[in-house]
Amino acid sequence: MFRDQHGWQREYEKRDSLFIHDGNPLRPHPLLTLGNHSNDFFDSRAIIADETLLREATADLTEIFLKQCQDPLKVHGVVGPKTGATKLAEFISIRLFAQTHINCFWASPAKTENQGVKSMVFAPEEHRLLPRSRVLLCDDVLNTAGSVEMAGTATMNAGATVLPFILVLVNRSTLTEVNGKKIIALINRATPTCTPEECLKNGLCSLGSKAIRPKEGENWKLLTADY
């Protein structure tokens, strides 16, 4: 192992990639994918962008997985939602090939919306890889599991079997599994979330703090600015 959980959290902190709200009502707070609000947020973009660090992260994550998976030879491919987990899926597939010497593809479906219904779709060249394959799901940060669930649905719709594990860099939910799939994470940091109504009544919204999506535009700078 390159680092334990505390070591990986320090890497996020060193790269200004872990946001924890300080209670200042002038400071906005994170709005999550499915609409809930939170007091903190992990942004893995700096980790993903550093290929050396990402290779070390995937090496540690794969090592944990291989200790828990009874038959890693059953993994044909790795799927992670675009764009946050695209490189992660690629590097996990490379690591699995190095460990098992069995070819392992990777694919990364993109979000789409049709008449208000959100889903994920694979590019045609990825879709051809999936029928009759056994696939491992991954994601960079698991907040509500919404993105990885959509990726899993897209994978099954393409004719693949989804294995009962989800590999993530950070699990900041209170979940230990998603639809029977065990979550394996480098960092487990359970952080409660609240609905907009709850936040307006008792949370940061009640103090005047605005909820914003951390990864949109310049929002990360707004979250971490001096107030």
Image: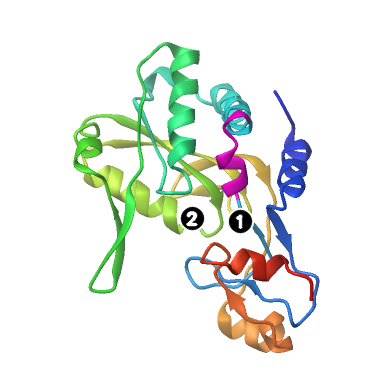
Q: Is residue 92 magenta?
A: no
Residue contact between numbered discs 1 and 2, judged by CB atoms under 8 Å? yes
Q: Tell me where residue 38 sits by quadrant.
A: bottom right
Query: Mark 2 — residue?
Result: 145
Q: Is residue 109 above or below residue 19?
A: above
Q: CA distance from mark 1 to mark 2?
A: 8 Å
Q: Quadrant of the C terminus?
A: bottom right
- In magenta, the rendered stretch is 44-52
Note whether 13 is above or below 57 in the view shown.
Answer: below
Q: Is residue 119 above or below residue 168?
A: below
Could you tell me which secondary element the residue under label 2 belongs to? Answer: loop
Closer-to-camera residue (94/72): 94
Identify which residue is drawn at 34% across, 25% down.
Answer: 76
143 left or right of 105 in image: right
Name the residue carrying label 1: 173
Answer whether residue 46 is magenta in the image. yes
> Residue 184 location, x and y as percent?
57, 38
Q: What mark, if any, has residue 88 been given in the picture?
A: none
